[in-house]
Amino acid sequence: MSIVYIALSVDFIHPGHLNIIEKARELGDVVVGLLTDEAISSYKRLPSLEYDQRKKIIENIKGITKVIPQKTLDYTDNLRSLKPSFVVHGDDWKMGPQQSVRLKVIDTLNEWGGKLIEPAYSTGFSARDINEEFSTETNTPDLRRARLRRLINAKDIVKILEVHNGLTGLIAEKTKVTDATVQREFDGMWISSLTDSTAKGKPDIELVDITSRLNTINDILEVTTKPIILDGDTGGRPEHFIYLVKTLERLGVSAVIIEDKKGLKKNSLFGTSVKQTQDTIEEFSNKLILGKQAQATKDFMIIARIESLILEMGMEDALTRAKAYIQAGADGIMIHSKSTTADEIKEFARKFAGFDQRVPLIVVPTTYNYITEEELSQLGVNVVIYANHLLRSAYPAMQKTAETILKHHRSLEVNDFCMPIKEILHLIPGGN
Ligand code: SPV
Ligand code: MG
């Protein structure tokens, strides 16, 4: 029998897939190249189901001989090792982002006289609508919580955007930019202490208590599906931190980042212009250990944030602390800097890459924001957090509107920079 190859990602099976599989079955023994998380996340959103779950579904479909991983969007490696007589794919990829992948498949098949078969791709419904519906319906706390680790494993760099309420959550959830080959979107959300406090008109000094922060988290959880990283400030007293860990896990938050400061915490970007005290390595490690012991799932992450560079304690201190916190069980290290150049972050990242025991590295390029995601990824950074930009862009816009109304004794002049009433009425579906 001839070998017939199909590549699938399948979060769910729809008639379009079954048409392809039926066609392939007529031609020979069907081998499915199941796209890994890594392959899928290189061009679109991570699927709701993990690779092994998707594999199980495909293996149980009639007429599938074998399921193997396809680790890139590019078919070449799998095709060269299998040398199938046929590849079957719906004709929908002749247009759009997969055009170049298709041409490469044709070239590769030509090496041994294989053929590309392209049945008409007509499902009668929108796979995209189903996908969006599906990701909301299957968004249990367990699935959401686990998604951050999956993303870190699958992607060169994970992109996280600051959110501080349901509406900004929706922006992080839905904003997409598409170019010729990929669709770009944010991977998850950062609930910043600075912007959560500022949005409430309060200073960023751990004054907004956990109950209030949990309300913000809940508002965001209700309308989004992407993973959440909470800015946990200092984590508070170890006895309180234990409760925070358990609560966040239960809600489906993926990670908490706590910083190694104690006493009255001030925002890091004040640096040494205000009094701030760094915790001792022993005390902070102890907090991490207690947090890890309190954790019930394997997926939740407790990330240690090092303030040595912020407090001008030096690179050696930062590196010593990173080693100690990893030893204490930290699932990731966030290294913060308020420098306007990326030099100290680069130096830290290079030395961190040489550690025997390595965990994901997280950075917050607010002051050194000329650096690109590509450069950060090359330095070995796993997660980049855009920590405050939605609130910082909203405030000047609102201020301008308030001033314009005062100036003109009416609101006509703000029309140009306000969204139309019709648009805001339809912004959130379900209101009419
Ligand atoms: C926050 O966003 O609240 C942070 C990052 O902790 S920073 O403001 O840079 O300290
Ligand atoms: Mg903060």
Image (cartoon, rainbow, N blue to C red):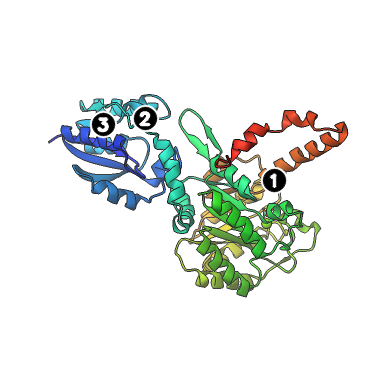
- Residue type, numbered disc 2: Val
Q: Position of residue 83 (x, y in %)?
A: 21, 34
Q: Quadrant of the C terminus?
A: top right
Q: Label 3 belongs to which residue? A: 88
In the picture provided, is 417 more to the left or to the right than 183?
Answer: right
Residue denoted by label 1? 391
Q: Residues within 10 Å of mark 1 (few under 14, many from 20)?
A: some
Residue 210 locus on image (x, y percent): 65, 64
Amino acid residing under circle 1: Leu
Q: Nearer the viewer, residue 147 or 281?
A: 147
Q: CA gap, disc 2 to disc 3?
A: 13 Å
Q: Secondary structure at mark 2?
A: helix
Q: Amino acid at mark 3?
A: Val
Judge from the rendering whether residue 418 lies leftward or rightward of residue 321; answer left or right.
Answer: right
Which numbered disc flags the more N-terminal residue, 1 or 2?
A: 2
Residue on which the image places disc 2: 101
* Residue that appears at 38% across and 50% down: 49
Q: Please tell me which residue lies in front, 80 or 200.
A: 200
- Camera-side residue of 319 and 411: 411
Q: Nearer the viewer, mark 2 or mark 3?
A: 3
Q: Residue furthest front?
A: 432
Q: Which of the two residues, 286 or 88, is positioned nearer the viewer here?
A: 88
How crowded pointer 2 is (Cα within 10 Å; few <14, some 14-19, many 20+) is rated as: some
- Residue displayed at 73% across by 63% down: 207
**Sequence-wise, which precedes: disc 1 or disc 3?**
3
27 lies left or right of 410: left
